Amino acid sequence: MNQKRNKTLLRIREFFRLLFRKKITVLALAIFLVLVVMVLLAPVIAPYGYDDQDISRAFTSPCREFLFGTDKLGRDIFSRVLYGGRISLSIGIIATLIASAVGILLGAVSGYYGGWFDNVLMRLFDVLMSMPPILLAIAISASLGNGIMNAALAVIVTAIPMKARLARGQVLTIRSQEYMEAAIATNASTAQIIFRHVLPNILPVIIVQITLTVAGSITTVASLSYLGLGVQAPFPEWGAMLSAGRSYLKDYPYVILAPGIALLLTLFSLNVLGDGIRDALDPRLKD
Amino acid sequence: MSEKETLIEVKDLTVHYVLHSGTSEAVNHISLAMKKGETLGLVGETGAGKTTVALSIMGLLPVPPAQVKSGEIIFEGQDILKLSEKEKKKIRGNKISMIFQDPMTALNPIDRVGDQIAEGIMLHQSVSRKEAMQKACDIMEMVGIPAVRYSEYPHQFSGGMKQRIVIAMALVCNPELLIADEPTTALDVTIQAQVLDMINQLKKKLGTSILLITHDFGVVAEMCERVAVIYAGEIVEAGTLEQIFEFTSHPYTQGLFQSLPSLEDSKAKLIPIPGMMPDPADLPEGCKFADRCPVCEERCRKTLPPLAEMEPEHLVRCFRPLKAK
Amino acid sequence: MENLLKVKQLKKYFDTPGGTLHAVDDINFSLAAGETLGVVGESGCGKSTLGRVVLHLLESTSGQIWFEGKDITHVSRSELRELRKKMQIIFQDPYASVDPRMTISAVIDEPLRNNGMKSRSEREEKVAELMELIGLAKRFTDYYPHELDGGRRQRAVIARALATNPRFIVCDEPVSALDVSIQAQVINLIMELQEKLRLTYMFISHDLSVVKYVSTHIMVMYLGQTVEYAETGDLFAHPVHPYTQALLSAVPIPKLGAQKQRILLKGEITSPIDPKPGCRFAPRCPRACEQCHQEIPALREVADGHMVACHMV
């Protein structure tokens, strides 16, 4: 068993070697980790609270005291970006994980069993996917009312069909493999087949997709907040900050600069990371 | 036969695949010569380097990872390995063509088969579209496909028919050399018989030389005049059909024959070759077959036996050849 | 000898967009314990489907199957579980038939776990025993399939099939994906195991020389139907059906001067979808007459234990 652990270790090391083959992936991972750490340590790093107002210092330009300046209520933008990142990133990641878990399970079961269940589910997802995802999210969010939870729910519902589709396609490919037949011939139960053969084999593809979806979810949350549907004042959120700042864009462009750059860096690093993981997990691209 | 002119000569060819995980020594110092009109069988197992030799001749080696470490391939007085891509294109498909095991890789699924044949003609010969189409029809008839099927698409043909079309495409410019890489392996045995029969008849008619790559000694016996057996990137035995089949000298060649269940003799027991071919990324020092060889000695593990001439044309790479004429 | 397996009028049809595909169409045979039935035919003749129907990996359309004297055509879930311990399958492609994410020991262990062997140490012992039986060195225990060559993988597949101590194994082209020198190793292994464990095989292959080597009886199939059935020696010495004759003559012989007069068949295999009445082989048969195009010839005995389905013999 010790040898087996060594093998797993070797595999993991090999994965990282392949992942770090491209400089840009290393850069992306570094950016993402720095962002996460900063956001997590917001209470420590941030010089001010996210809603410490002081009208007298409204629209201060970036200076040593206020790294990215202050907004119309005199709140420190740097601190708000840090606190806002907590909301953006956590909704992005949690919503993606929930959507993936539900979507993959539905997709895997649907693909494995086929039949009417598959048919009903897939047609339902067709309907959901026929709408542009952002419109769907807006519709859900608007009908449920404003708020973080509802925005997250909108993100989840929007992301589920994609995940289910993907998982279903993967399962269909694996289902036709001879080792599935071998498992049936040796009396494997359906649960054993799904957990022992299907899920481990579709996981690499799913992991890549999850990375990319986190980026998508963050965008959706930001968009909803930008439209006033998601996170409500005074909570900072990157999209909401962009929205609040847009009226002052002409005179004080720095009010949207910091949240915009934070959002951009997050999305960039996640997308590049997703590509990198895909290349590292695809054995055909190994050399 | 020896008076005939030499068509192509592969001299001391060494091709390695340089990969991150290590260097795979696919082909090591292989020399082959083919005369005009002759069929040479290149026999070996998966990974022995057969296809790499073929791709080198075609100028189709994937570079990188492939690297030609040494050697030359002389065809019509020039070294193919040194030609520019443009010059190679003039030879490829025109003077040397190749057919693969899977006909689908050579056919475009959304193009009419007749047009695909005609396209090859127009690429290499200055003929009008109409003439090219006429020629395509002629060659389809020649490989046993009615010309009325000119406008059909590849999926409308069965496996054997597709392979015929691929052969037609390869022969349409009347090449000097046809490289056939396992041309019938994917086909059923009755269809294989038809296709082999057809290739033999075309060869008689057109005088094309054929380099037949296969693992099947049955096909070799039927098609070839000379045979080269290749193991772990090296030629281990080469000679005429008679020399290889009747006076088998290398233990590997003999092992292959003894591994084949026979249709004729039902009592003969199969004697498998123990073990497996060495990893081309980690070849042993001496004879590559030493580990599996029943007559291996100490020196076999240390020094690589030379490819020695046992008698005219019969070459064997072994310190202890089994028998000679 | 006791009949281990008996199949009567077995049919398996598939509904396809183009019509009904007659994959297995009225197959009858019986197989005694310890024997090997070789099933030969070209691609699309239904030989693989036949093997899967017998194993209940596919449900039969009609007909009956007996195993150990019991009618197993329709069985309950629990009966099927018991049955599957006794009937196993070895696949053609050792690359597709093992899960790429499992180690070799996990592959061999799977049937043990599935069939209720709870104790881990007991299972480890059994896996080691099986690996020794099929000649796979202990050091390969924790290897992943892609780290092994085809021959070794196929050995692992054989070990998996033997894990539940079956009596009957369907070998579906078990050596056709392997190189010649490895092929001989695996064929010999399969035959040694038969002797050691008193196994009964249904050996499906397109390679006549391999089938001849391993089988006691041979069934030649063409488009879902049996055209000829006989003892191995008998079939090769006196092939009666025109298709069998053509098939035998088409095999290239690796010997000088061994080429016999070849019977070249016209055309190619026709479609098994909604087949026309009459003999399935008639469109390609050099001896076909009017009757052949109208009536399906019945399988009848032309010599002791030698069955042929042809109007012309």
Image (tube, helix red, strand yellow):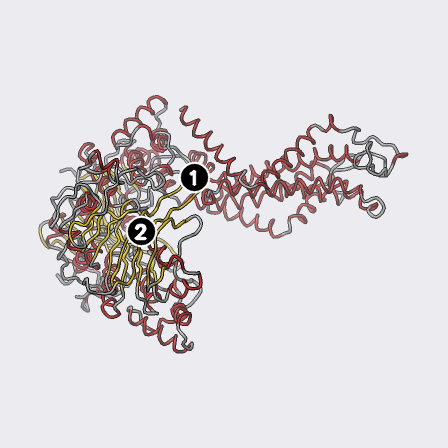
The three-letter amino acid code for the residue at tag 1 is Ser
Q: Label 1: state its secondary structure.
A: loop
Read off the residue under disc 1: B21
Q: Which mark is residue B234?
A: none
Read off the residue under disc 2: B12
To which chain does the residue with label 1 belong?
B
Q: Residue B188, image x and y in percent?
A: 27, 56
Q: Residue C203, image x and y in percent?
A: 23, 44
Relative to C307, B151 lies left or right: right
The three-letter amino acid code for the residue at tag 2 is Asp
**Residue toward you, C198 or B101:** B101
Residue B111 in view (yes/no): yes
Residue C283 in view (yes/no): no
**Residue farthest toward the front in the current orientation of the protein:** B77
**Residue drawn at the location 31% of the way across and 59% of the way down:** B179
Query: Alpha-carbon neighbours of circle 1 within 10 Å: few (<14), some, or many (≥20)?
Result: few
Q: Label 2: state its secondary structure.
A: strand
Point out the image quarter for the C terminus of chain C: bottom left
Q: Are marks 2 and 1 on the same chain?
A: yes
**Residue toward you, C124 or C223:** C124
Query: Alpha-carbon neighbours of circle 2 within 10 Å: few (<14), some, or many (≥20)?
Result: some
Q: Residue A284, image x and y in percent?
A: 45, 45
Distance from the alpha carbon under mark 2 to that under mark 1: 26 Å
Point out the image quarter for the N terminus of chain C: top left
Look at the picture and state if A167 lies above or below C135.
Answer: below
Relative to C108, B203 lies left or right: left
Relative to B108, B195 lies left or right: left
**Residue toward you, B247 or A121:** B247
To which chain does the residue with label 2 belong?
B
